Amino acid sequence: MVKKEQYYWALLRIGLGWTFLWAFLDKLWGLGFATLKENSWLAGGSPTSGFLLHGTKGPLAGVFQMLAGSAFVDWLFMIGLLLLGVSLILGIGVRVAAYAGSLLLFMMWLALLLPANNPFLDEHILYIFALMGLSLVKAGRVWGLGLWWSKQKLVKQNPWME
């Protein structure tokens, strides 16, 4: 029997998944929200350059600015956004997505040191807490394919993939 709070976690999982997937789609096609069409990845733009060149600040800004425009960084970032979004929406590999997403968000937090609104706790850190919560409660099992995924032979042999 599904408890009421599990629906909350499922909604949070799907919402965060859509957030990552939307970022991927907007950067890929330049839908005009965070990325203009002429700056889209398909138009030859770099999905990471804008943030890494102009959004970074603090003691590590130079490190992140050196990564701007790197094809390797662009591909890694875009593949990460796509896989995080799909994994969370479908409810498969939620644990892996939680750790990978947390790493991405932590690196974005480092690129902004110290964040403008609160020097320590900003939305990147709160999203990390949310992702870890999704993993802990196995949120992919409600309104997702997590239960089916956990029964697959590969996942049974490698529980970290759940």
Image: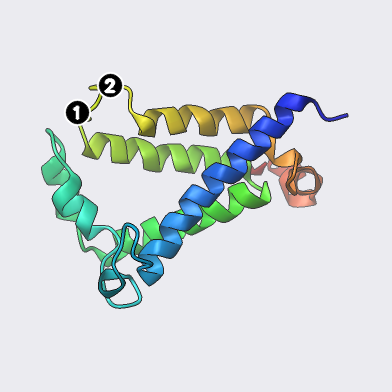
Is residue 127 visible in the rendered structure shown here? yes
Q: How is the image coloured?
A: rainbow
Q: Is residue 16 above or below residue 74?
A: above
Q: Residue at x 80, y 25 (%)?
A: 3
Q: Secondary structure at mark 1?
A: loop
In the picture as drawn, the residue positioned furthest to the front comes out as: 32
Residue named by callout 2:
120
| Kind of residue indicated by mark 2 | Phe
Residue 47 horizontal/vertical position (percent): 30, 62
Q: Residue at x 75, y 39 (%)?
A: 142
Residue 111 horizontal/vertical position (percent): 23, 39
CB atoms of marks 1 and 2 within 8 Å = yes
Q: Secondary structure at mark 2?
A: loop
Q: In screen coordinates, is 6 left or right of 100?
A: right
| Kind of residue indicated by mark 1 | Leu
Q: Quadrant of the N terminus?
A: top right
Residue 52 horizontal/vertical position (percent): 20, 51
Q: In screen coordinates, is 113 left or right of 158?
A: left
